[in-house]
Image: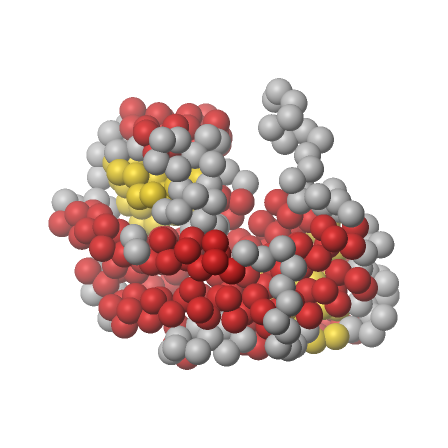
Amino acid sequence: MPYHHLEPKEDPTVLSFNETEFTAQTESLIALRPRIEELADRLVDEGYDTLLLVGAGGTYAQMWPYEHLARRTSRLTVRSAIAAELVVSGDALLGERTAAVFTSVSGTTEDSLRAIEHCASRGALTIGFTGLPDSPVAQRVDVALVSAPKAWPFDVQLLLLLGRVLSRRGEFADYDRLADELAVLPKVLVDVARQAEPVAAAFAEAHKDADYHFLIGGGNLWGFTYLYSMCILEEMQWLRTTRVHSAEFFHGSLELLEEDTSVIVFQGEDETRPLTDRAEAFAKRISRDVSVFDTRDYPLDGISPEFRGLLSPLVLDTVMDRVSKHLERVRDHSLDLRRYYRVMDY
């Protein structure tokens, strides 16, 4: 099939999408703003000098955009860590001036629970974002910030937390304006879901028999690229994938491309966009099946142009949720089906 640029079109029918629940979940994230800002002010006022963003699997990958944001705009030490590795390897900066941030939808992830105990034992302040107030994660952290159940992703909370900290440090002058504009997200993201629906359906129909996908992304979308490859296509659909950062595309993985390879390109709106453009252009020279999901295609009414790049992970998550639901339909493979994850002991 010819490569195609996936442009959204209006369609009122959205598969397996509970608009009321989705809106309520997103509103619950925005409603955390006062408590998140109070926490951020505490971190600055009490002299915390390290933010450790700890996760496992998808929640680890979701930390990367905010490590990336801090790395390019701040002198504050902000780094992500894999929960299980943190426990066995440690971190030289972990101590009483460290704030360790955890995210968990279920609040029961064993690796994260052990990492919370590890961080607490080193004197760190532990912070948890979850949707279940009685979950083990919520009960074991020092500060629990609870949203609606099953609310995902955690980008709103992480952006508010890091944005406020950077603002207080004089490193994010427009934070208040950004935070105010997030109030329109519930409607904006519903619009994104509706517009992405026909694109998602078309992609799924065209690839229902594909058993391998090559994913490319960069900048603050690299985390989502990793997440979608591993947590959705591999874990939830049992499909084989290769995932590569657009800046690393020309250092090995490109040799896997063939003319019928399904290439999925995630394109955002930060300063790394030209790197993904370069990888996309090359992929189109080899493969006849290049699908580009570009956050720039979505209007995001009420969001200022200068903030669009920061919201690309959240927008892309909404778009690709539509793709996931349609892959589930055309492949007759439930997104909840597992063979090993939380099924077998390991």
Q: Residue at x 44, y 59 (%)?
A: 23
Residue at horizontal 31 percent and vertical 32 percent from the top = 141
Q: Residue furthest top?
A: 345
Please name the colour scheme applied to the rendered image. secondary structure
Q: Say which residue appears at 34% left-offset and 39% top-offset.
A: 128
42 with respect to 178 (left or right): left
Q: Percent position (x, y) of residue 183? A: 34, 67
* Residue depicted at x 49% and y 66%: 189
Q: Nearer the viewer, residue 138 or 254?
A: 138
- In which quadrant of the rendered view does residue 224 lie? bottom right
**Vertical order, 181 against 120 (above or below):** below
Q: Quadrant of residue 88?
A: top left
User: Where the C terminus falls, by quadrant?
Assistant: top right
Q: Which quadrant would residue 129 be assigned to in this image?
A: top left
Q: Is residue 123 visible?
A: yes
Residue 137, x across and y down, in percent: 38, 32
Residue 215 drawn above or below residue 270:
above
Q: Let me know if residue 178 appears in the view.
A: no
Does 167 sit above or below residue 58? below
Q: Quadrant of the N terminus?
A: bottom right
- Locate residue 332, reporting x and y percent: 78, 47
Front residue of this view, candidates 136 and 65: 136
